[in-house]
Amino acid sequence: MDMGWFAFIVLIFASFRFTRLVVDDLIMEWARQPFEKVVTTTDSSGHTEEWREPRGIIGEFLHCHWCVGVWSAFLMIVIYYLIPYGEIALLILAVAGLQSIIYEWSEH
């Protein structure tokens, strides 16, 4: 199991990006939606607030960065070692992950 530092860093950023994709990104809302319930509250001034809460163990899993992160890391390592040319997909995810970090830093 020989892995250089560059590959290790790529796996870290790829796992980070995939985790954010599953837990936070709008593009994956369709996968989370069946395991969420929408909660709406209205205060005395008429202001309505809406948020999503996880339903069941799968919902909890899909909302947990730590949980998804572990499985994401596992998946990235499987791709690295078992999928031909998987390094390309991992590199794309890694670059996107680093880009999202830079974007967050630049917005604050």
Image: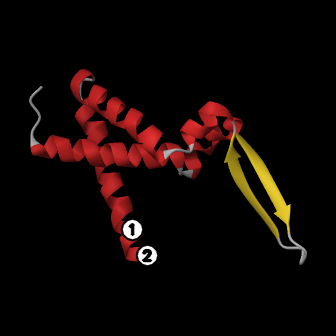
Front in this rendered view, residue 22 or 83: 22
Residue 20 % position (x, y): 46, 49
Q: Identify the residue under disc 2.
A: 107
- What residue type is disc 2 on? Glu
The quarter in which the C terminus is drawn is bottom left
Q: Identify the residue under disc 1.
A: 103
Residue 30: image quadrant is top right
In the displayed structure, would residue 70 be above or below residue 1? below
- What residue type is disc 1 on? Tyr
User: Which residue is depicted at the point 35% across and 53% down?
Assistant: 96
In the displayed structure, would residue 19 be above or below residue 57? below
Front in this rendered view, residue 88 or 33: 33
Front in this rendered view, residue 93 or 13: 13
Q: Which mark is residue 17?
A: none
Residue 6 % position (x, y): 13, 46
Q: CA distance from mark 2 to mark 1?
A: 6 Å
Q: Dot 1: what SS?
A: helix
